[in-house]
Structure formats: C-alpha cells, structure tokens
Amino acid sequence: MASALRDRGVTDLAKYKFTNAERFAVYVVHGEVCYMCTKPIDLKTMEIDHIIPESLILDRPKLEETLTAFGLSLDFSLNSYENWLPACRSCNGKKGANVFAPTPLVQLQLTKASRRAAQARSLAKRTVKQAEITKALNILEKADESGELSDEVKLHLRAIGNLQEQEREPSRKNEPILLAPNFSIPAHEHSSYHRDELLKSETCGCFFCLRIFNSSEIVCWTDKLPNSEKGETALCPYCGIDSVIGSQSGYPMTHEFLEKMNDRWFGGIRDST
C-alpha cells in the first residue's frame, strides 16, 4: 500500500479519524491518565497516540523492520487498540517531534495496550449500541473546548459519567470524572456499594431528580463487586441515575436535603422530566 502511494506521488497519509466510541474506550480502560506523564486527563482534550507511529505506513521497509523487532506479525494494524494509548496534548506533541526508535520502553507500552485491547473493543461496541451515550459523546465532541458548557449540555454529559462510573478502573472509583477542561463530575460516594443499606431503608431519595420513594421500587442495580452476581449501586427507578441514598444512612429523606445533595454533586442541575 505504501509503495503504491509513493508511486502515485503521495507522500503523506491522512490521519486515522477516531470515532467517539473508540476515544471513550481507550480513555476509560487505560485509567483516564496520560500514559507518558501519568497525569489525569479529560475526555474532551485527550489525544490517542499511536505507539508505533502511523507515519510508518508510508515506509514499508521501516515498518516491517519495526514489527519484526517487536515480534509482531507483519499484518499488525497500526490503527487498532493494540497500538493506541491515551495521551495529553503536551506529551503527544513532544513525542511527535522525536525520531521514533524501537526500544524496550515501547515494547512495554505495546504490551500494555495489547492487554486492554479486548476490553476496549468490547466497551466501544457496547457504547455505540446506547443511543443516549452516543448522543452525549457527539455533544462533547462539538462542545467549545475553552468555553463554559451550558446546563443542557452538562445534563446530557451525565450519561457518559454514569457509564464511565461502571467501567472505570477500581483505582479511579473515588476520583472525579473529567469530561472537559471546565467540567467534571464528582464520584458518587453516597450512591455506591450499599445494596444492603438501601434495602433496609424505609424510604429512599434520588438527589438528581429529587424524588422520594420506597426501596421496593428499585429494580436496577450496577457496580458488581468481585465474585458477586448482584450490583451494589442502585439506579433511580424514575430517572435512571446512580444517585440514590436511603434513610438507613442517617440522612433525612426530605426534599430540602436532596436539594443540598444535588447542589453539591450536580451543581444544581436537576431532572426536569
């Protein structure tokens, strides 16, 4: 392919266009951090780096030499989850300015990507099947990177946060979900891992839609613990958000309390349905 392109006078190759589902999957399964500097990054500005540079597609001899050096098959795809890792803009820019050379460090990076490739591929497939998530990712893609997001946009982006809460690495469970430079969602510590507490509660409340209801109305759970078939985090039976708290927690199940919780965790954004 590369030689044929050069024969036609083509010296540059259009960069691969990542889908929103691919970006989301790579971001989540690799811990929401830049793989080079290890600092947390937001989904909006995160860049996907090709561990083996995509530009080698235009230099088949060099590509084959590189693949052989890493013990990879010659049909290894540079545009695959096995060759993608999340990076911040600064680190990715610095790497792009350097001359690529096969090193043991690159080998470790390829191994890291390969170990999470199947998980990323599966998450991407599940993401595109959820219309609400697809819509939210499209909205995030078009949102102004530096501007303030509207309340309506933030409301749509909650759907991403809910899925990310379920899929993210355990080490990130209590960390804010960083969706854009100027927008993050706090981890919902009050709604996580307390099935028994909720089931024993006489009344429950949702601090997103502000409804108060009986625990028997809860039918959907998420966040399965290891070696368990049952989810530990309740989804509100009215709005579907994982923001349920019960009276067994010791907190009063009143609209006044739920409004305060909403202000803290959702910045005053509430379900209007």
Image: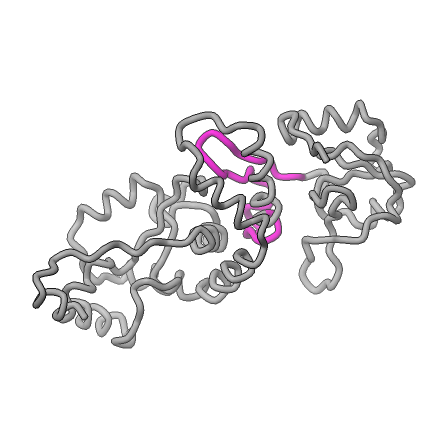
Residue 248 seen in the figure? no
Quadrant where the C terminus lies?
Answer: top right
Q: Position of residue 133 (x, y in %)?
A: 56, 49
| Residue 66 picture quarter | bottom left
Q: Position of residue 111 (x, y in %)?
A: 37, 65
254 is higher (above) or lower (below) than 124? above
Q: Residue at x 60, y 44 (%)?
A: 159
Residue 114 seen in the figure? yes
Q: Residue at x 84, y 33 (%)?
A: 250
Q: Position of residue 50 (x, y in %)?
A: 30, 56
Magenta-highlighted residues: 165-188
Q: Is residue 166 magenta?
A: yes
Quadrant where the N terminus lies?
Answer: bottom left
Q: Residue at x 67, y 61 (%)?
A: 226
> For this view, does 250 lie left or right of residue 142?
right
230 is higher (above) or lower (below) than 255? below
Q: Is residue 59 magenta?
A: no
> For this view, does 18 lie left or right of residue 160?
left
